Amino acid sequence: MINLAHALDRLTEAQTFGVSWYLKDLAAGREWGHDPERLIATRSTRKVAIMMTLLSAIACGEHSLEQPIVVPEEYQHTRSGVTQFLLAEPTLRLHDAMVLMIAVSDNGCTGAIVDLLGLDRINAWCRSIGMTRTIHRHGLPLQTADLQSNTQSTAREQAHLLEAILVGSGSEDAAQRLGCRSVHCAMALQALRGQQLRGKIPARLPETATTAHKDGTGPGMHHDTGIVFQGDRPLYLLCAYTFDVPDMLADGESGRSAASRFIAGLAHTAWHALEEN
């Protein structure tokens, strides 16, 4: 474990852009991190909390997974997801819009779901589970790195959220603390396992690994947060954020590539240290 800490530190120190990350060994409870309490612009990693707020509303009967939801045409003008390619104002089942919000990070679906719930409801849900520094500000993200114009959180709070979902998937008492039932936590994990943007945490992991994760991207920001499983066994969780990433590094590599490679390196290093234990 000392070797793991040193390897993670070396990876972190080698970066020329800002990083904040948190890693937890889910078997032994050991933790590592670099500036995990730093407030960061979450970008699309914010969508995990939106999903769980929606599932809590479904659990209490306010909404149904089968009910229709319309994606407004003005929300389709985005480069994220698939509703941008559909005819104007597509109607989806609420469950399907939720899955598209996570699996392909569809911003049109996200905006429609946030409108359905309201930002106040999402922020209140976050506070109710202890995410006191997390603030959701918009249904659709603005193309800015300014922290006060973004949804903000910390790597540690996002890790707390993921672990709460994992525990809730196997415990009704734990799920109830999230305002839902175990079946809803399991549904959330299934959506996260369906993530199609796989260039960060999963990129260097073996075929025996599965990852329930949500990535995020913005101006100078490339993120990923997730739970890594060895077979059915939850091995570790990693929430990794980068910021002030230039378009191009001095060596000619794109900033997106370098940031993604860094996050993949964290996940790869953790895997090889923890999968033997």
Image: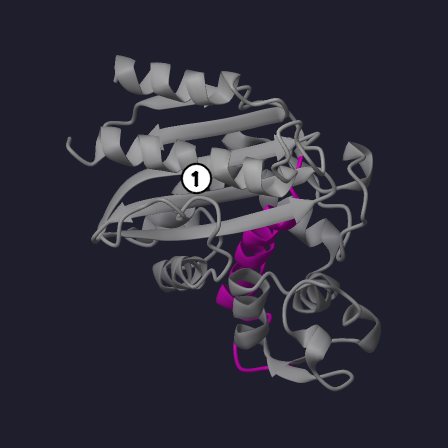
Q: Quadrant of residue 192?
A: bottom left
- Measured as percent of width and height from the top left, residue 18 is found at 63, 24
Identified at 70% across, 61% down, the residue is 114
Identified at 44% across, 59% down, the residue is 188
Instruction: Mark yes or no: residue 186 visible.
Output: yes
Here the colouring is one colour
Q: Secondary structure at mark 1?
A: helix
Q: Quadrant of residue 251?
A: top right
- Decide if residue 229 is on the left or right side of residue 61: left
- Measured as percent of width and height from the top left, residue 216 is found at 60, 48
Identified at 56% across, 23% down, the residue is 15
- Three-letter amino acid code of the residue under disc 1: Ala
> Magenta span has 257?
no
Identified at 45% across, 50% down, the residue is 213
Quick check: 101 above or below 132? below
Instruction: Locate the N terminus by quadrant.
Output: top left
Quick check: 192 above or below 45? below
- Measured as percent of width and height from the top left, residue 27 is found at 23, 33
Q: Which residues are magenta?
A: 41-68
- Decide if residue 162 is on the left or right side of residue 20: left
- Measured as percent of width and height from the top left, residue 47 is found at 60, 53
Q: Nearer the viewer, residue 15 or 97?
A: 15
Q: Which residue is mark 1?
A: 264
